[in-house]
Image: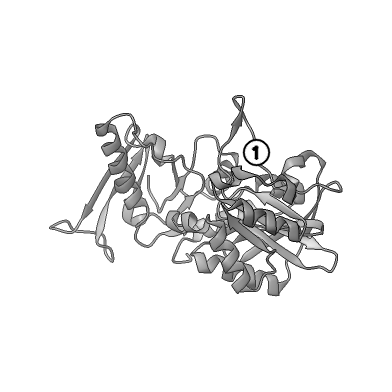
Amino acid sequence: MDGRAVLVCTEYEDPTADLVIAELSRRRVPVVRLDPGRDFPASVTLAVHIGGTFRAEAGTGWGGRLTVGERSAEISAVRALYHRRPSPYPTGASEQAARFAAQENRRGLGGVLGALPGCLYLSHPQSVARAEYKPAQLDAAARGGFAVPATLVTNDPGEAKAFCAQQPCVYKPLHAGTYAIEGEPAGIWAATVEAGEIDGSVSRSAHLFQARVPKIADVRAVVVGERAFCARITAPPGVVDWRSVYGSLTYEPFTCPDTMREILVRFLAEFGLLFGAFDFAVTADGTWWFLECNPNGQWAWLEEAAGLPITNAIADLLERGADGE
């Protein structure tokens, strides 16, 4: 493949990434798509030279190629890596040789993908991983100027009971991982909780309890580079987590205030991110209460529902690459 390619790392079924790939293809930007944890080494070949007598490309210390099927990319010429939602590298837990190979794959291919010379990352895998910790998010949000609801992270039932007795509260998971009920995928949504419901089961894991914001609406703000795309989301009365009632939502796009956009961009910069999907609860006085930032959050449905040009913004950033060309 000729030209400076964009690498797209994501799972096989990712309609959101499909939109971006289609737009890059329309612009004639070379794209190599792979799911590192699933494709390597079965359908991916990696050959990277570092140091020694190897003559690296000008300005870099290494070179080589990454080949996926009939597509390949010169390592020193990758303009951007779009780290969307790749499958995790397998643990190889069944036997020792498989465990060793799995760890070598993660540190070999993963190490190369995380150190591409002159590459723009949207966003860097290590930055994404660091930003997924909600306590770090809440701390950064409070220091950065956002209004943050009173929050308790605990495995102490007594602390949880006392906290929930002080004000109306919600419980929300610390990580939006996969969960199944009777074999069917299910979401764990934020839900109200009262002091009387707290029991000893809280001691079995960390829990996040938060003061319930008396919101009149929600805001989803999708930030790409220094551009912010905002939509007001209105759910039926009494709904705590709008994600639980997608079919009953209404959307209203609006221009993000400059002061808020600056705070959003600074928040991402603290974590080394170029993308973030922020959720806010909005109260009657107009205050945006920070709830969370998903460093790889979904946005395709919002683009369609609210008419926000997020695909083009992401393609713009990937096409320009780190040098802005």
As drawn, which residue projects farthest toward the top? 182
Residue 198, position in %: x, y? 68, 47
Task: Name the residue: 69% across, 58% down.
Answer: 162
Dot 1: within a 10 Å radius of its alpha carbon, few (fewer than 14), some, or many (20 or more) residues? few
Amino acid at pointer 1: Gly
Residue 276 higher or lower than 245, as above or below: below
* Label 1 residue SS: loop
Image quadrant where residue 53 sits = bottom left
Q: Quadrant of the N terminus?
A: top left
Task: Name the residue: 69% across, 71% down.
Answer: 260
Can the viewer see residue 303 in this picture? yes
Residue 63, position in %: x, y? 26, 54
As drawn, which residue projects farthest toward the left? 53
Image quadrant where residue 15 sits = top right
Residue 98 higher or lower than 276, as above or below: above
Residue 107, position in %: x, y? 31, 48
Can the viewer see residue 123 in this picture? no
Q: Which residue is mark 1?
A: 187
| Most foreground residue, 193 or 142 | 193
| Most foreground residue, 202 or 233 | 202
